[in-house]
Amino acid sequence: MISSEILTTEVNIVDSIKEKYFLKFGNTGDAEKIRVFRSPGRINLIGEHTDYNNGFVLPASVDKAVYFVISPREDDQVILYAADLNESYTFSLGDLSKPEKSWPHYQLGIIEQIQKNDLTIGGFQAAFGGDVPVGAGLSSSAALECCLLFALNEMYGLNLDRFNIVKMSQKAENEYVGVQCGIMDQFASAFGKEEAVIRLDCRSLEYEYFPFPMDEYLLVLCDTSVKHSLASSEYNTRRLECERGTAILQKYDSKVLSLRDASPELVEAHKDELADVVYRRCKFITEEIQRVQDACDLLIEGDMAAFGKKMYATHYGLQHEYEVSCPELDFLVAETQDNPAVLGARMMGGGFGGCTINLVKKEAVPEFEKQMKSAYLEKYQIDLPCYKVKITTGTEEIIN
Ligand code: GLA
């Protein structure tokens, strides 16, 4: 996709959500006060499950985003209209109880965080939607959270900076939605920059942008279209296993407060005491944290072939040591292994479904997609969605 195409897609989506906003809320009210905000989904090049271990990640925000068309109200009512689902949910700022349907949980979680921080907002009405595929591992939920909080921050002058927005959005997910996610997804959505990946130190929150050259290669996501129910329970189990490993290693080095502070050598030295499962979790995480650093050096050198090999190494670890992959993801990665046009491939995100991310030579992309689609159809009888992604800027207001 070239930039003007992105723009056209965006204009179309914004126009369509605006239209739905007016259909839902009518033409009444102060048109001047209607504003539009955008927050993108994310990919992650390397550094998986390292964020909650205080390690490094290398995400970027992409040209698939959530949009809010929003305006303030005179009362304390919040009316949310999910344009893609054609469903509404109304509540008052004084009652944030959890509804049965799950999509409003993210927005309620954001308002709860605003209130917990003693900040004040008024009622509002909003239509929202977008083109981040839900459940595909592109973090549509983080995009939704960051988009709403950014919008309310602008509308009500809450004086939050992007760090506050990221941390409060993560907390909304941890405390209201109940998913113990790390900080990567919200950070990537809020801090994304065009054609750059972000190396984030999840301990200090220091970050650096690295240019990601897209003139010769494209990033293609292959969406397994499955989400195994294990995803959130196993995610929380992995966190506990990492904590168990940290506690054991700490006995031998008091500076180990998280796996970030441990080396692969330390893990190896205490292999027996860690015991099989925890040992393999710790091995993967300590190596993966190192891999992010090495991968950044390769980006600087422009050695994309070696960068791609790191992606395969990450997948191997996620499949065999961290055990968060699934047969569909493994199949898609294995399919690329003998394709000289594919430099690297791996599962992306939390695991147990979602997408693989593939670094593919640009001219070979159509053939690559064709082959992957036909192999997946034959094996799983599923029409494989493939997304070519562009790296775009993070959360922003759209002014027209
Ligand atoms: C999910 C979580 C992130 C991160 C990834 C795995 O996307 O939301 O915080 O832990 O899984 O890297």
Image (cartoon, rainbow, N blue to C red):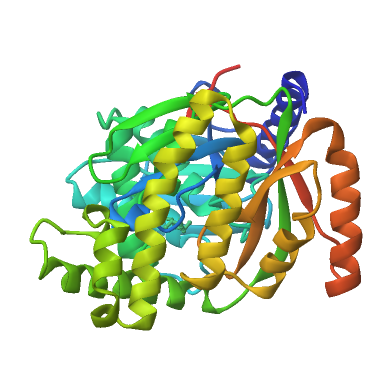
Q: Position of residue 105 (x, y in %)?
A: 44, 62
Q: Within the image, what quadrant is residue 45 found in? A: top right
Quadrant placement of the C terminus:
top right
Horizontal arrangement in the rendering, residue 302 relative to residue 169 (left or right): right
Residue 343 spot, x, y in % from top left? 70, 42
The image quadrant where one finds ligand 1 is bottom left
Q: Nearer the viewer, residue 105 or 189?
A: 189
Q: Residue at x 43, y 26 (%)?
A: 209
Q: Residue at x 89, y 67 (%)?
A: 377
Judge by depth and name the residue closer to the eye, 121 or 392.
392
Q: How many marks?
A: 0
Image: 265 above or below 122: below
Q: Is residue 172 visible?
A: no
Observer able to see residue 239? yes
Residue 189, image x, y percentages: 47, 39
Q: Is residue 246 above or below residue 165?
A: below
Q: Is residue 124 left or right of residue 386?
A: left
Q: Nearer the viewer, residue 379 or 308?
A: 308
**Residue 219 as seen in the image, left or right of residue 363:** left
Image point 50% across, 53% down: which residue? 141
Spot occupied by residue 29 in the image (x, y as percentages of width and height):
52, 31
Quadrant where the N terminus is found in the figure: top right
Foreground of the two, 344 or 116? 344
209, above or below 305, in the image: above
